[in-house]
């Protein structure tokens, strides 16, 4: 993620640096093995929005 801004409980991503394409059939596997600070996102979505959880009992990476 190169650039983003926050609106309430949402992080709106404005610019990304893709690492590599992932085949649709491998997307779930890649999602669950992604390292910290890595986001797996489908590019067919027009907007890239991350919903922020501010739950004190939840570990946030």
Image (spheres, helix red, strand yellow):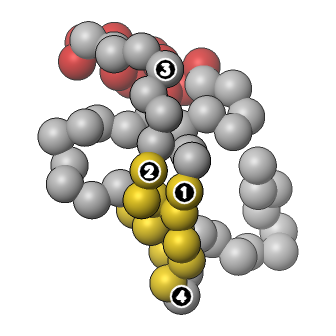
- Residue 46 in which image quadrant: bottom left
Q: Secondary structure at mark 1?
A: strand
- Mark 2 or 3: in front is 2
Do the residues under discs 3 and 4 have CB atoms within 8 angstroms? no
Rendering coords of residue 25 (x, y %): 24, 12
Precedes in sequence: disc 2 or disc 1:
1
Q: CA distance from mark 2 to mark 1?
A: 5 Å
Instruction: Name the residue carrying label 2.
Output: 15
Precedes in sequence: disc 2 or disc 4:
4
Precedes in sequence: disc 1 or disc 3:
1
Identified at 76% across, 56% down, the residue is 60
Tell me if residue 54 comes above or below residue 2 in the rendering. below
Left or right of 19, for residue 44 = left
Q: CA distance from mark 2 to mark 3?
A: 13 Å
Q: CA distance from mark 2 to mark 4?
A: 19 Å
Instruction: Name the residue carrying label 4.
Output: 8
Look at the image and tell me in which quarter the N terminus lies.
top right
Q: CA distance from mark 1 to mark 3?
A: 15 Å
Left or right of 54, for residue 40 = left
């Amino acid at each position: 993620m190169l650039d983003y801004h926050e609106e309430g409980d949402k992080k709106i991503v404005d610019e990304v640096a893709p690492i590599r394409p992932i085949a649709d059939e491998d997307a779930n596997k890649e999602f669950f093995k992604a390292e910290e600070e890595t986001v797996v996102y489908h590019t067919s979505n027009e907007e890239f929005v991350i919903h922020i959880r501010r739950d004190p009992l939840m570990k946030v990476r």
